[in-house]
Amino acid sequence: MLNTCRDGRGKTDTGMDGKNKEMRKVKNGYIELCRFLFCVMIVIHHNAQDFETGTVFPSGFVAVEFFFFISGAMAMRHISKENGEISQKMRYAVDYTLKKIRRVFPYAACGTLIAYIWRIYSVRNFSADMVPELAVLPFELLFLPMGGIVSGRLDRFMNAPLWYVSAMLFTLPLIVYLCLKAEDAFQHYIVWFVPVLIHGWMILHMGGSWGWGETTPVGYSGLLVAFSNLTLGFGIYLAAGKLAAKSFGTFAKVLLTIAEAGGIVVCFLFAASEPEAYVFETVVGILAVSLTITLSGVSYTGKIHGKVFEWLGMLSLPIYCVHWWTGQMVQVYLYYCSYPVRILLILLGSTVLSVMMMAAFHIAGRTAKK
């Protein structure tokens, strides 16, 4: 397995020990900052809608591509560190996926349960008509919506953005298995050609490759999006390893840094525009190149570190898990506030709730260890 990607830390991934091993624990602050910025993009995309001004980020769904890419790249990084042959490859793939899901589950479960409690409270007059609505709860808690058991419509979920985790639950084990079982074919064909074929099929049959709730012969389109972009994330890590092996002078590093940051800027410019299929594919490609530079560690963003950036990166997960129904609450109870104020309140409310959850789970974890 490839084992040379520097992941933006300026150190090769070659089983370091001692002082170098300690340095690897320092997270790339630039990546963590991007996590937070793209999370904010999703919050605004889902909630910043006004009859007079329109949607601020109508194409903000491009942020999901970033998170799929990062998840795929980190999975490839994890696999590349394995020493020796993995005998039970599918079991390894499932265990790895479930380990990632367990990290999300406390925040997702807490956010989803609060959303259902609020729903019951806001209706007040409980009736038999609400039973089908509440019956979706266990499927949401188990991240099963993308399995097709329940409808993929937004109005069927109390925490609709978690389709992302559900799609990853179903697709990531298969991708990891292919990476382990058919390493040569995976690294030289699948990661480069299959994402293109999937995106092309979705454009031809659905007009665009960003939809997640459309019905296709293989299930919801969200599964295709997840499989395609997680797989490309594996490719991004592999490409980053190739780039990390090269030497660059100061001028080249400056250009790479500009291109890297420019890719993120392009994503935000696209998010503020109306979506078009081929424009979207171009932006996805630019984002992939930007992340390749970041993960290779050949640019100057690898020098960005700090607890503030790490904290912002950590905060992005719980915010993602609670922003959907937080936005609905603000829209219902604070509808009289001006449009920009409502958006700020949604961001503030999601942040406060996220900090509270992080603190509660941290205390619970320390208590459990005693």
Image (tube, grey):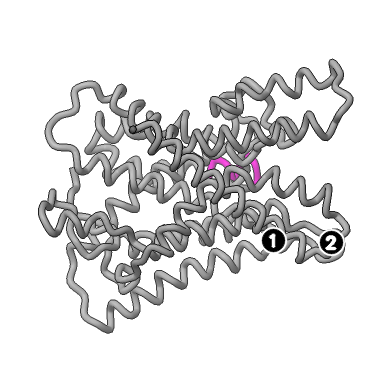
- Nearest the viewer among 200 and 300 is 300
* Relative to 113, 35 lies left or right: left
Task: Name the residue rendered at 53%, 32% in the picture.
Answer: 166
Disc 2 and disc 1: Cα gap in Å? 26 Å
Asked if the magenta segment contains residue 15, the reply would be no
Residue 339 in percent (x, y) is at: 80, 63
Residue 221 in percent (x, y) is at: 58, 36
Residue 43 in percent (x, y) is at: 64, 54
The circle drawn on residue 274 is: 1
Q: Secondary structure at mark 2?
A: loop
**Residue 194: quarter of image:** top left
Residue 286 makes an appearance in the image:
no
Relative to 196, is 31 above or below? below
**N-terminal label among 2 and 1:** 1
Farthest residue in the top direction?
Answer: 128
Task: Name the residue rendered at 22%, 56% in the picture.
Answer: 24
Relative to 359, is 245 above or below? below
Residue 306 makes an appearance in the image:
yes
- Nearest the viewer among 288 and 321 is 321
| Residues drawn in magenta | 199-207
Q: Secondary structure at mark 1?
A: loop
Q: Which residue is mark 2?
A: 337
Which image quarter holds the N terminus? top left
Question: What kind of residue is marked 2?
Answer: Cys
Task: Name the residue rendered at 36%, 66% in the picture.
Answer: 306
- Nearest the viewer among 62 and 50 is 50
